[in-house]
Image: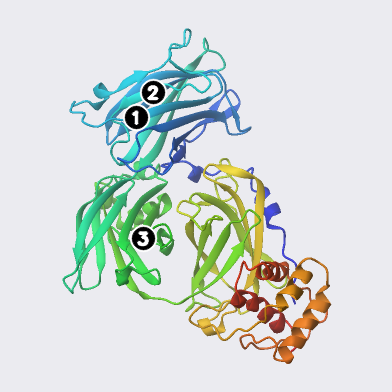
Amino acid sequence: MYYKSFLLIAAVCVTLPFLSEDAFGHGLGGDAAPPISFEGMEVTIFTQLDPADMTAGEVDSANIAIRFYDMLTDENLEQVTYRVEVWRSGDLLARNYFYDDDGELNVEVRPKGDCYEAKPWKCTEYYGEVHGTAGGLFARGDGRPLIDGPIFEKGGLYNVKVSIEGATSPRSLVAQPLNFDTFVSVAQDQSFFIKTAEAAEVPVTVKTYYDDVENFSFNQANNAISFDMPFDWDPEYIELVQMVHEEIRVPKSFDPYNPETSFKGYVDGVEVDQRVLVMDPYSSETENIVHFLVTGTELQRINELLGESHYSSKSMSFELVPEGTVEKNSFDMRFDNGYKAIIAWDSKYGAGDEIPFEFSFFDNNNGLVKDVIYAFGLVNTQGEQFNLVTGDNPELFVGTKSVEGIATHMITIPDDNMYTLNLVLTGEGFSNYDEFFQSSQMFEVGVSTSSSFVPTPSTQQSVSIPDWVKNNAKWWSDGEIDDNTFASGIEFMIKQGIISVPTTSSGAQNDNATIPDWVRNNAAWWANGEIDDNTFASGIQFLVKEGIISV
């Protein structure tokens, strides 16, 4: 029997008061500093780049937004005087004072190369109106101060140090300056060639968000790619790191790195959690992209495993090893804003296993939704909710964020049964939606694709449904015919051979069962041509299995 699931959105909202130290550290396009107690408030700085995903050499102008606010109320402090410094690899690149009225400072940065000064800050120039009282460059209305210097012209991690010198009035100085450290990453492409066992040369690009990579190598015996990168493993520094991000981009024609490949990844010889590796076959028409997304928690685990002798290491080694092709089961989930999620998992896993479920998010143009924010939970047939994921950054946004629009979640399915996945889209980038978008789907796992509830291209049996049946589906989805009439009609057409669907075992007849909303949604989408016959047939299979339809 199907039971209506708990409302996931309520579970999401109750987490809002929770604050997590894990929210602070190095960001890709944005970063929040740990809060400081100040006059009964918990104040912090949030630094954001625009564009958020920036590659060195591709941007002539960027914006740094620095927000000074109280985390307890989410309100900005006004009339703020800032001292801002920008550092990279221990070098000071810029330092100046700024002032703004509304607590959000916007500064334009124009990257400038060809700086040959031993001290790079000497190449930096500043432009803008000087505030008459505060003395800093004034961000007025749409007008922004400008920094022209050797900033963001190279890839790597940039440290934006912000000192709050005054607040609430251009004449009011704080008794003790409030100092914050934030970090943002700028990507850099480095090109290499690998020679395969067949003597073919294959171009490979490493896109690094941290520092230059070196010692790039390819192992013909196992098709493994490896490289090194400067990195400080001191535990105090590791505590600040939120993520180290590297991309390996390989032509789609290079079969050992195709989208169905499973990989093992290693950092300094330690095998990383499977969630660290993300395969992206969607973002490029010509390349498959494998991401190393090494979180701060994973870095700490590696450091502890290798022991104190590792703390003084000044480099990080990466190795990516293809493990062979896997068969995956999957299903789609659609949302009212036109977005879609694809949920996929390796078919070899079954009940009792910790299964790596891959979540991929797409907009209404079928492009990956970068920095999507979402929450989800599973519900069993008794209506019990488990594996609720609502994120650990509630002071910034509700839900968990997928930087690349693809993420892996390790989920243990207790036993062989039907389960409902409730998935909620809550925002993008650095903000929540005004309205959350929810979708639900029922599924089951098995030890092989043949036992899966949702057929995959390699295991689908014949599906034959006449187009005129879509009229019935549309009338039912619009409420013009009731559940019993719809179920009876489908049952009759299956028995008469009008509809042919994949073979499935029939459950005991259950006249009191309720048809899930996701089946009704499938019917509407199928009637409108938004999903194919196979996807609609999965809903009919479910009705048969649950005894709602008897064949």
Which kind of residue does numbered mark 3 sit on? Val
Q: Examine the rendering and report whether any part of residue 520 can be seen.
A: yes
Cα–Cα span, label 1 and label 2 = 8 Å
**Residue at point 82%, 81% (across, down):** 511
Within-10-Å neighbours for mark 3: few <14, some 14–19, many 20+ = many
Q: Secondary structure at mark 2?
A: strand
Q: Is residue 413 above or below residue 42?
A: below
| Above or below, 276 relative to 62 | below
Give the mark toward the camera: 3 or 2: 2
Give, as a three-letter code, the residue at label 1. Arg
Q: Give the residue pinned by disc 2.
A: 146
Asked if one can make out residue 549 in the rendered structure from this viewpoint, the answer is: no
For the point 58% across and 67% down, which residue is it? 332
Image quadrant where residue 188 sits: top left
Residue furthest out toward the bottom: 496
Snapshot quadrant of residue 145: top left
Identified by mark 2, the residue type is Leu
Where disc 1 sits, the SS reads strand
**Residue 132: x, y in percent?**
47, 7
Say which residue label 1 marks. Answer: 110
Label 3, label 2: how far apart the Cα atoms are: 36 Å
- Spot the residue most to the front: 468
Q: Find disc 3 in the rendering and name its residue.
A: 290
Q: Tell me the number on the disc at residue 199.
A: none
User: Of discs 3 and 1, which sits in the foreground?
Assistant: 1
Q: Are marks 1 and 2 in contact (CB under 8 Å)?
A: yes
Residue ID at (71%, 52%): 10
Disc nearer the start of the sequence (3/1):
1
Of 417 and 358, which appears nearest the observer?
Answer: 358
